[in-house]
Amino acid sequence: MARCCAVSTRDTLINGLQAGLQAAGVDPAVLPRKSGLPLTLWSLGRGMVTTEQGFALWRAIGELRNEECILEFTRLLSREFAPPLLIDAVFASALDIGRRGTGQPLHPLRVELKRNPAHREIYEAHYGCRVKFKAPRNAIVFRAGDLDRPFTSYNAELLAMLWWATRA
């Protein structure tokens, strides 16, 4: 006999749970995929999940809170350090691609820059997170769950064709 636990009395608790997840830095949109539950978890159903599904949700929440994806700018083939403007352009472009591609707000966990502090307010307003200057590396750090966000223009068939074309 499968026992159930209530995730919601539908709209009230589901919305509350989603808001709480967002406040904790977890994107509710990636939670169903990460936990192996139906992608329609938030929009369909009676707001009930089995105990096993509830455990899967909480495991996924824990994983999403602790995982990071780091885009680090390093020098591989040069003795010179990259100019700060180039680092800014690469990080801003990566963030813009994520925002435009998913059609959702996207804010890194933090940005780390080796340079001396300058224009902190502008950087933090643009990235929507804390910017650490005089850091040991140049990096922009995202939640790993941000990588699970689908692009609005995602086309599996086209991607498969392009993938094979690059292998020819």
Image: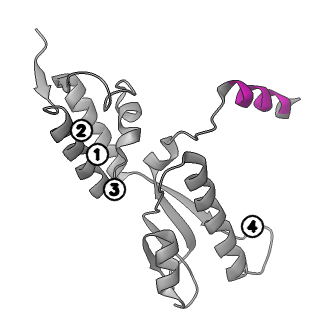
**First in residue order: circle 3 vs circle 2:** 3
Q: Residue furthest front?
A: 11
The residue carrying mark 3 is 25
Q: Residues within 10 Å of mark 4 (few under 14, many from 20)?
A: few
Q: Which mark is residue 58?
A: 2
Which image quadrant for residue 82?
Answer: bottom right
Q: Amino acid at mark 2?
A: Trp
In front: label 1 or label 3? 3
In front: label 4 or label 3? 3
Whole-percent x and y of residue 56? 27, 30
SS class, disc 4: loop
In front: label 3 or label 2? 3
Whole-percent x and y of residue 141? 49, 62
User: Split into 4 quadrants, where in the image is the C terminus?
Assistant: top right
**First in residue order: circle 1 vs circle 3:** 3
SS class, disc 3: loop
